[in-house]
Image: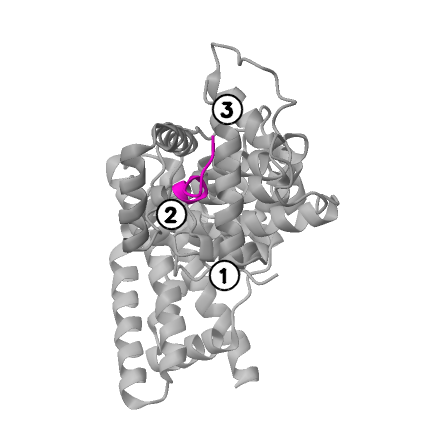
Amino acid sequence: MSDTWTDRLSEYIDGTLAKTERGALEAHLADCEACRTTLDELRRVVARARALDDRPPASDLWPAIAEQIGVSSGAHRVVSLAAHRTRRRVTFTVPQLAAAAALLLLLGSGGAYLALHRPPAGAIAQRGDLTVSPVGWVEKTSSRYDAAVAELQSALEQGRASGRLDSATVRVLTQSLVTIDSAIVQARRALAADPGSAYLNQHLADTMRRKLELLRRASALAPART
Amino acid sequence: MELTSPGAATLRRDPDQATGGGGTGDAETADVALAASGDGSAFERLYRTHVARVHSLARRMINPDVADDVTQDVFVRAWTKLGTFRGEAAFGTWLHRLAINVILARRTTLGTERGRYYDAENALDALPGRPMVHDLSLDFQQAIGRLPDGAREVFVLHDVEGYKHEEIADMLGIVPGTSKSQLHHARMALRKHLE
């Protein structure tokens, strides 16, 4: 059964009817059992839709995705992170590069300090152009790293205050630093819960090194663009 | 197709708050940052977290037969576009909108434009009469799949995913009034398959 109000029931459920129409419809519902029944059914449809479960695919799609994007899907993918990283070129916007380069100049020693304080040669395994850190290196260098980050942030403030970095550039750089630092904080939390984990040590070192790599790239590329 | 962020606050089923399917705040933020710099393991973790939601969206929006292929496409595109993710919305919200864009583009490729609008009062009559009693939700989902394309898309986006009519109209290139009308027709048809 249908009447002039039936087609407005969904709007009533969704709360999009005007106040006057809502009042008129409610008055109609009081006298129309058919509309009350339809309204109840429509509400059940909405409730069912909201309760639908998300189901994963029947088969794992990750191996095919990993192949398409050029990363390993095997059990040993963790230990080849650096190799994966080099397969996907990291790109940055010109403002990011310019800002990072300017900060490097202001810092003087911030990023270079880390570059000069690598783990002992005997404990280092080379992976492409990156250096793999042994377990424990993170603990030994984290305080120096924190100091360098603090110096970097201080320089950022100086650059902003002096006007050498425009606000848009500072915003982009700040956001990038926050994102990377968030990854570092998370890795440190995990490491605190499991200090002996070789993977977590590696993970944290890689993340810290990623930030350093950004600064190195900026240092090498930005002067030519500015 | 430009990727824009939906009104995250309007999503009833925010992908980062969905039970068992959402990210975990800082950990996910960290994984996004790592994945954006080329970390495949971090991206796999993001995949594991969100694949059920993306696959379910594809299954309901377009066709179960191509859901696997569409889901792969979504994650491959997400990998290539991670550099454009600026964190204005949650990663799950960004990925969800990317998935919708991929699905809508695929819909055109598959030539499913025909019969988009609800033009048959009894479009679901061909469905089996009574559902299997042990899996009512599956029958309801089958009924969703039998809706005309336009009505199905509006129903899924509004009632399942929680988008507003204005957002849906923008995605589908229709006016909000059409979205409301299609939604009502879809609901009216589906009430026959509640149990």
Residue A28 visible in the shown view:
yes
Same chain for the residues at labels 2 and 1, yes or no? yes
x 56%, y 39%: residue: B152
Mark 1 crowd level (few <14, some 14–19, many ≥20, 10 Å Cα): few
Residues under labels 2 and 3: Cα distance?
27 Å
- For mark 2, give the secondary structure: loop
Indicate left or right for A24 with A210 as reference.
left
Q: Which residue is mark 2?
A: B11
Indicate left or right for B146 with A115 as reference.
right
Q: Give the chain letter at badge 3.
A: B
Q: Nearer the viewer, residue A25 or A87?
A: A25
Tell me the tag on residue B192: 3
Q: Which residues are magenta?
A: A1-9
A2 is within the stretch colored magenta = yes
Q: Which residue is mark 1?
A: B4
Sequence-first tag of 1 and 3: 1
Residue B92, placed above or below residue A89: above
Residue B40, placed above or below residue A115: above
